[in-house]
Image (cartoon, rainbow, N blue to C red):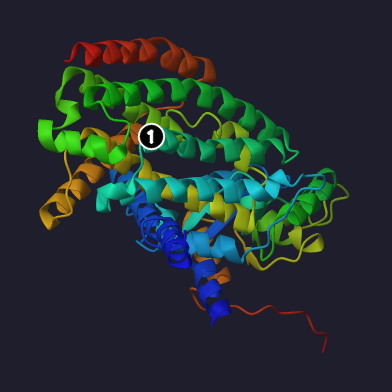
Amino acid sequence: MNSRLFNWCFKKSIWVYHANAGACNGCDIEILDVLTPYYDVERFGIRIVHTPRHADALLVTGPVTRQVRERLLRLYEATPEPKLVIAVGSCATGGGIWYDSYATCGGVKNVLPVDIHIPGCPPKPEAIVYGVAQALGMVPKQVQAQTYIEE
Amino acid sequence: MNLQQVSLDLFYTLIFPGFLFTAIVGLLLTWVDRKITAVVQSRIGPPWYQPFADVGKLMAKKMVAPSGSSIGFFIAPLISVAGVALASALVFRALINPQAGFVGDVIVLLYLMTLPALALIIGGASSRSPFGAIGASREMSMVLAYEVGFLLSIIAVIIQSKSIQFSGIIAYQAAHGAIAFSVSGFLALCIALLCVQAKLGFLPFDISEADTELIGGPLAEYSGSGLALFKISRAMMFFQLPAFVALLFLGANQLTLLSLIGLALKLLAVLALLILIKITHARLRLDQMLRLFWGRLAVVGLIAVVLAMVGW
């Protein structure tokens, strides 16, 4: 009973912390677009917070450069449980054009356990809202994770 | 003092006019605040249960204590909630049962309403975070500034009504009309409203929290239940402080239905004024705020006290 109540609360109120892990600022501008009155994510209970201690979800953009890797890990540790990690943009989902660069880790999934990927370069604000809604289970998932199998 | 008396007092403090009642109404009022803000910014805004979902979620989350933080980090949220709960128990019991008050309860109320700010200072200073330390020091200067104005406006009311008992002030207004209709009372009301704005940490006086520069100031290191308690105490203050101002300045109130509806309307009017000031103003710098409160508002407050002594 209690856990059902808390699950409901968690779904209705999600505070996100926006972490730039070496992105080109394209995705960051789209994330700021989501928070404007036009999209008004406060009606879903989504709010941006300015410290990881208050956060429930980390919106990570960028391919995670080597310099920022340690900071991202510390950020993840500073966020209290339970927490979600949402990778926003092509670079965060798989490294983008820097997938095999010596200077990046090639995507957030190589550093942190990612709950949901939002692809796009940059993703539209609608896509970001839709992705966060999927991560919360408000919308059913349409794509499954697939791995390459050699026949 | 027998067992029945003690349990009755506990009930008053914890459930009916005290903690639980004030917390629920206060959280609903924070929704009103967020909804009005949304409408002014031409948005839809959150659903009515949003503050409850926020607090419930924070309660369920883990509370992370920064390494090296002292015991003050854990007791500060409790001090904050306890202060507001006691203050609201005193305020609303004076309305329900005028005999329940005691001589000088307005002075006690003043001290109790300072407790949340003190809790913020304790919590921020013991969180071992530079943001918390800066926020705590700013909060300290702000307390010293706005308490002067608040005290002067209350002194003007006390001189005018010749009573330092909360129910006595309400009874004086029943006999002589609202205090805000006299010149000194009106000046005192204006100062008290600005001080309430500062006490609530609303723009233009959210200098100690300053989301964009201090990432929450004293609250920066709080998470989970500690943050939830601070949010609850802030919501309770959002109900109790405007109610205090409405009872003190805006006329008589009895326990009749009509009078209670009138009180609710007065409360909403005060809240709407506070919210509109909050939405339409940008943050002041600390020195501007200190100059405003120690300079102009203190002078206006002294004028109000003198006028009250003359009998205007």
Occupied quadrant, residue B209:
top right
Q: Is residue B146 above or below residue A4?
A: above
Q: Whole-percent x and y of residue B97?
A: 27, 52
Q: Nearer the viewer, residue A72 or A83?
A: A83
Q: Whole-percent x and y of residue A146?
A: 71, 79
Q: Given the image, on which type of amino acid does mark 1 rest?
A: Gly
Q: Nearer the viewer, residue B96 or A44?
A: B96
Residue sitting farthest toward the right: A102
Residue for point 49% across, 74% down: A139
Q: Whole-percent x and y of residue B193?
A: 32, 30
Secondary element at tag 1:
loop
Q: Number of labelled discs?
A: 1
Task: Kindly identify which residue carries mark 1.
Answer: B104
Residue for point 73% across, 45% down: A22
Classed neighbour count for the residue bearing mark 1: other residues with Cα under 10 Å, few (<14), some (14–19), many (≥20): few
| In the displayed structure image, the side of residue A27 where residue B12 appears, left or right | left
| In the displayed structure image, the side of residue A89 where residue B299 appears, left or right | left
Q: Is residue A43 above or below residue B76?
A: below
Q: Whole-percent x and y of residue B47?
A: 36, 61
Q: Is residue A10 above or below residue B296?
A: below
Residue sitting farthest toward the front: B1
- Write down the chain letter for disc 1: B
Q: Is residue B241 above or below residue B147?
A: below
Residue for point 84% across, 48% down: A70
| In the displayed structure image, the side of residue A16 where residue B164 appears, left or right | left
Q: Does residue B293 appear in the picture of this structure? A: yes
Residue for point 24% across, 34% down: B169
Q: Quadrant of the C terminus of chain B?
A: top left
Q: Nearer the viewer, residue B19 or A81?
A: B19
Q: Nearer the viewer, residue B226 or B153?
A: B153
Occupied quadrant, residue B5:
bottom left
Q: Does residue B284 appear in the picture of this structure? A: no
